[in-house]
Amino acid sequence: MKFGLFGINTGACADPDVATRVAGAAEAAGFDSVWTGEHVVLPDPQAPPSPAPPSFPMLDPAVALAFLAGHTRTLRLATGIIILPQRNPVVLAKELASVDVVSGGRLLFGLGAGYLQPEFDAIGAPFDDRGPRTSEAIEVVRTLWTQESPRFDGRFWSFRGIQTRPMPVQQPHPPILVGGHSPPAFRRAVSQGNGWYGFALDVDAARNCLRGLADAAGTESRPSERGRLEISVTPSTPLDRDQVKRFEDLGVDRLVPMMLGGSGDSLVEFVSRTADAVLR
């Protein structure tokens, strides 16, 4: 079992000095990775299903991870998740390849289709076809990360006769982790992802999602070069060893607890307390 920490760009960690302290503590304690979240904008006033008040600070994931790349040496740097259909995937491929380069090959690219229509509306991104856009955008990014002479002809994006360098350090490309708890997300993870990421799940909910992934594996083709689908989960409650064992028995590969604390001191203490509970 590997362990990450979620929230390295949000809340108190939107302060770069705090994020640096927390990431350093995580690396020293033996955590595998730190994870960003993303909402470009939040509805004001907050209304369901918005996950946070409008004043809640979130740094851009690529900016935050590039900054932390210079303050860490071994931590994987994960997006958990980037809302892919809100992005131009050609531009995003460049941004994230740059993170992989400046970090020496430590990027994990987690993505999702999104769910907050007011956010899509503010950005000017279509909401109703976000699923097909997500699936196509994954292939745009993969094409730009792997092809010497990239060419793509899709429904939403097309290009040829271009180059984008440097390419990522990791080969054939940084791991692509598909987030989401819906049947389309499960199918997308099986057919297009190196991994799947589930957010805010207890053991029973994780079990149901893994059943959904198994069902998707029965209908979707998966290229053999992608290997086994790696499973990462942010649990909905604080971890103890019993919970870790229950997740491990399900086949979960990585647990990414959400960091809790309103200051640098409290977050560093959370890192230490969680490490004592599950790593030592």
Image: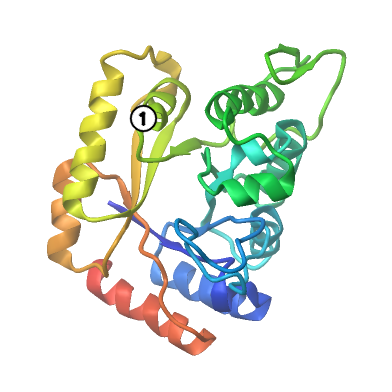
**Quarter holding the C terminus?**
bottom left
Q: Quadrant of residue 182?
A: top left
- Residue at 62 percent of width and 71 percent of height: 57
Of the residues shown, which amino acid type is indicated by label 1?
A: Phe
- Residue at 50 percent of width and 65 percent of height: 7
**Image position of 158 (left or right of 12):** right
**Image position of 37 (left or right of 15):** left
Q: How many numbered circles does the render carry? A: 1
In the figure, 255 relative to 241: above or below? Answer: above
Where's residue 149, x and y in %? 78, 14
In the figure, 162 relative to 131: above or below? Answer: above
Where's residue 193, x and y in %? 46, 29
Where's residue 235, x and y in %? 29, 58
In depth, the one of 278 and 231 nearer the eye is: 231
**Image position of 239 (left or right of 13):** left
The secondary structure type at the circle numbered 1 is: helix
- Residue at 45 percent of width and 56 percent of height: 49
**Image position of 28 (left or right of 157):** left
- Residue at 42 percent of width and 57 percent of height: 32
Where's residue 227, x and y in %? 38, 24
Q: Quadrant of residue 6?
A: bottom left
Tag 1 residue? 186
Q: Residues within 10 Å of mark 1 (few under 14, many from 20)?
A: many
Specify the color scheme: rainbow
In depth, the one of 29 and 251 nearer the eye is: 251
In the figure, 99 relative to 46: above or below? Answer: above
